[in-house]
Image: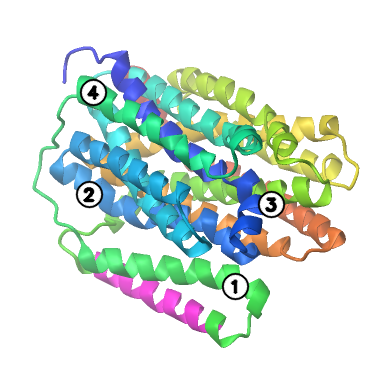
Amino acid sequence: MNTSPSPAILLACSFAFIIVQLDVTIVNVALPAIGRELHAGVSQLQWVVDAYTLGFAVFLLSAGAMGDRFGSRTVFLGGFALFAAASLACAMAPGALALNIARAAQGIGAALLVPSSLAILNAVYAHERTRLAQAIAWWTAAGGVSIAAGPVLGGVLMAAFGWRSIFWVNIPVCLVGFWLTLRVVPAIRHSGPARHFDLPGQVLALVALTALIGAVIEVHALGLAHAAVLGALAVALAAGALFLRVEARSAAPMLPLRLFTLRGFTPAVLFGVCVNFAYYGIIFVLSFYLQTVRGFSVLHAGLVFLPLTGTFLFANIASGWAQARVGARLPMIIGGVIGAAGYALLAVFGISTSASFWAMLPGLALIPAGMGLAVPAMTTAILAAVDKRQAGTASAVLNTARQVGGAMGVAVYGALVAAPATAAILSGMEIALGVSTALLLAGALLARSVHVNQGEKLCHS
């Protein structure tokens, strides 16, 4: 595509990432209210978050292949339609089970949106690699601001209209995104042989990830030695091993294992896992801490998250500028260190029965600043490592790994704060923040292995 792409195409793709990321965190401040109305315990509330991230993670790989096979625009439109329908089902859910099933359907809609939106950007900016880095930075900024604004918006909507409103708000956004896509996004088909839907791989991935996350969520209530927990772990291990074997032998795998042999690809994926494990998990437990230990109202708790939004936006923009000059590796390293500092400051100064908002502010500002600098660079490094015809699949691999990391973060950190006692919640928060600090530092070390020439290709293409 040689014509200069319309900014409206970037806007349409950003609409998708806004709605996808918003629904990762908007429910967090609503969880206590959902629990009261639907009579749901902590483990069921963890599933309100993890059903979405699991649906997202499990179907991302197939969605990437579907975009490569049927065209990114077609899959993109389908994602908007499914997300809107699932949001309607969430808003009308009569109980926790119905809500969690609808949340899983939302996740599938999100899976259709994310890799197809990145593939659209990669196609329309195919001959302008520097502008691709900038477009990805703006796309990531839109999602970063929405994921950070989720608790704030959720708190405002909850205070005014109740928890169901956090799902109603998705529908007009999806309709606008659908209309804009029809208007401005061209039909995009990727050259090369058609790829088939990998049903065995899809089923095995679903079984393995659901069993693993379910075991981690239930280990607090049932104990590690419980037969159900051990059985789920065994199923996850067996299904995971079979999945790798099937993918290695498949002529058209949903997860091309050879991608992991590309220089810099695996470190960038693992970096994404560390970032999402820490961030999703901390947002989940921080909402409980603010409302349970500190006694904040849902609106007050939502407003505490407000500092997360501003630094995300500025750091995302700075990331695009930095990549054009120094490549992807250095922003990832610096971003990981900044994020680690944020978690450490929050652990030391922001978690107690009386810590002020000002004590929490430095950590809350640095966490998204580090992520905002690092995540666009990570995404650019992934896309630069692969042929553009595999952009949908490569971005799906990255986002699958990130969503699995996020689901695990919610499951593990949720177990740390599941006890009702204040001292237990504070202790769990401190452990969670310590783990998050270590993960971001590990991510910074991993980023050193990202091939610097990936960034150079963006500068000189």
Q: CA distance from mark 1 to mark 2?
A: 33 Å
Query: Residue 239: within the magenta?
Result: yes
Q: State yes or no: discs 1 and 4 in contact (Cβ < 8 Å).
A: no
**Alpha-carbon span between mark 4 and mark 3:** 40 Å
Contact between marks 1 and 2 (CB within 8 A): the answer is no
Disc 3: CA contacts within 10 A as few (<14), some (14-19) or many (>=20): many
Find disc 1 in the rendering and name its residue: 218
Question: Residue 32: where, in percent of width, then height?
Answer: 67, 53
Checking the image for residue 285, the label placed there is: 3
Residue 299's x, y, as percent?
A: 70, 35
Q: Earlier in the sequence, mark 2 or mark 4?
A: 2
- Amino acid type for the residue under numbered disc 4: Val
Secondary structure under tag 2 reads: helix
Tell me: 371 left or right of 457. Answer: right
Q: What residue appears at the point 59 percent right and 72 percent down from the top-left corner?
A: 218
Q: Which residue is mark 2?
A: 65
User: Which residue carries the number 4 mark?
Assistant: 124
Q: Earlier in the sequence, mark 3 or mark 2?
A: 2
Check the picture and name the quadrant holding the N terminus.
top left
Q: What segment is highlighted magenta in the picture?
A: 230-247
Regarding residue 338, the answer to whether it shows in the image is yes
- The furthest residue to the left: 193
The amino acid pointed to by label 2 is Ala
Q: Considering depth in this image, is 303 or 297 the residue closer to the camera? A: 297
Judged from the image, the secondary structure of the residue bearing numbered disc 1 is helix
Q: Which residue is rendered at x = 33% and y = 55% of the image?
A: 59
Q: Which label's residue is closer to the chain start, 4 or 3?
A: 4
